[in-house]
Amino acid sequence: MTFVITSDCIDSKDRSCTDQCPVECIYEGERMLYIDPDECIDCGACAPVCPQGAIFRDDQLPESLRGFEEINREFIEAIDEVPIPGNLYADHPRVAAAPPAASP
Amino acid sequence: MTSNQTEGTDCTLAVVGAGPAGMYAARAAASSGRFSAIDVIEALPAPYGLVRYGVAPDHPETTRVAKVFDRAFDLGQVRFLGNVAVGRDLTHGDLIRHYDAVLYATGVSAGRRLSIPGAELRGSVSSAEFVSWYSAHPDAVSYPPLERVRKVVVVGGGNVALDVARLLVSPADALGRTDMPDDVLAVLSASGVREVDVLVRKGPGETRYSPVVLRELADLSGVSLVVDGRDVDAVGDATGLTRTAQDNLQTFRAWSETTDTSPTRTLRFRFWTRPTRIVGEDRVEAVQAIAERPGAMARQVLHRTDLMIHCVGFSADGADWLPGSLEAGVMRNVEGRVQSADGGPILGVYVAGWLKRGPSGTIATNRIDAEETVARILEDLDSLPRRADRSDLVDKLTAQGVAVTSWSGWREIQEAERVLGQRRGAATTKLQDRQLMVAAAHRARESQV
């Protein structure tokens, strides 16, 4: 079980979740944040603090956001070295190609 | 690297307390590269504080945060000195003689009770006492006689209250695979508890429960969740609430609209209810409270109960071996620099975690908190008076006859617990007895020789 960050994080990146993660498994792309599914301990501290409501446990992902499970995993796998919290990495290609989020 | 920093790498740090705050502090200090030695001194034979003795046993995923703490000990300069209690085996004076800086992260472990008449009656216990029991703390007092208990009142609007209430209504077979010791499981299996009432001072739109944990109560088989719809309706406009509060309100609303037909156990939330007195001859018989739902007349209510568990916080009161002074149950400090009673800083002495800011936040709150304190230590380090005694504290402790448990000793305790767990099909079962833990840890030392 893991938590997954989804589309409402794109172009928002509030980062409140990173302060809540006890294992620092949330990493930053240019346009959104991603959770390392292998490091995540499933504690649930991140989800309630996200002002966008963008974080879900994998078994509670809305059907339309299912693809983000793969997006989070593949983003982490694409980082060559050991990822460092706070560093900026290239987005998952599907996120990089997403249309700009409408400003609130 | 400047010459100051080169000098600085000879510095030593004692971290007292191996809970989350102490471990995050040790990790931050180690990664600064400014210390040649960091000793994590822990009163219990096992590390990780509330991760081991506070996180509910049916939520083992949270305990996996330990893997981050394990890594701190893999860094060469961090040592674990378990089974060493400041105030029992050594003094604060010993620490400042042996280390350049001392950081206290011993938490606030004294359980508070409501200060109302009757709080001292038999059957009125603090969450600290109850949680210590089910999490197999070596110093826990004997178990509550749950086989004679039918009804329990739990007071509190935080996650501890939620954990305690859940453990009391959970079917015993669901707990068999946790790391609880056999005698704790036996008591819970024989439990006569049928009803648990959670009394919350505020409304269903103001709770701080972790939303996922609250929602998951619905997964417990045979448990009926009861919320009065009038409590939910009285909340009114929910737009200004935090996301956590809104999530929880939604959960409570759903529960208020359903009724379970044949429950084995009932878990009821009573909001806007403030206990005023515990009634009983020589033991708890009932809790008297004022129910003051907005828009309704306040009324006095009486809830019969066999056991009352106060989940209303903790304090450091009673830890008279601590330097500095306590204020509102925590150590007087500025950003982690410990202050004396008259307000000046006590040089070289620091604090992190609950002892610094009080019992609040999640595990990760201690990371940010501990990193702040370590940043202050690093600022001060070059100007601190150097330690007077360069000998190894462990030699002094060993000469005193203290059975220090090392990092490899802790690994040996874990191995013993794994073997114990396998006998009943659990991944691990905790050793509770301090002597057994120390003996298990000691085997490592013998096999190393």
Image: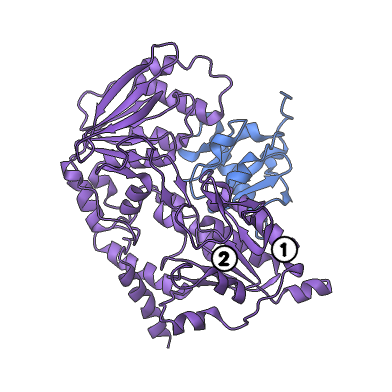
Chain colours: A blue, B purple
User: Which percent across, then down, holds residue A28?
Assistant: 68, 46
Query: Which residue: 59% across, 33% down?
Result: A54
Q: Residue at label 1? A: B378
Name the image quarter holding the C terminus of chain B: bottom left
Asked if residue A83 shows in the view, the reply is no
Q: Residue at label 2? A: B15
Query: Which residue: 44% across, 55% down?
Result: B318
Residue B121, placed above or below residue B23: above
From the viewer's side, name the closer residue of B277 and B76. Answer: B277
Label 2 with label 1: CB-CB less than 8 Å: no
From the viewer's side, name the closer residue of B319 and B106. Answer: B319
- Under tag 2, what secondary structure? strand
From the viewer's side, name the closer residue of B342 and B369. Answer: B342
- Under tag 1, what secondary structure? helix
Name the image quarter holding the N terminus of chain B: bottom right
Residue neighbourhood size for the residue with mark 2, other residues' Cα within 10 Å, grouped as few (<14), some (14–19), many (≥20): many
Question: In the image, is B432 to the left or to the right of A32?
Answer: left
Q: Amino acid at mark 1?
A: Leu
User: Which percent across, then down, holds residue A13?
Assistant: 69, 37
Residue neighbourhood size for the residue with mark 1, other residues' Cα within 10 Å, grouped as few (<14), some (14–19), many (≥20): some
Q: Amino acid at mark 2?
A: Val
Question: In the image, is B341 to the left or to the right of B88?
Answer: right
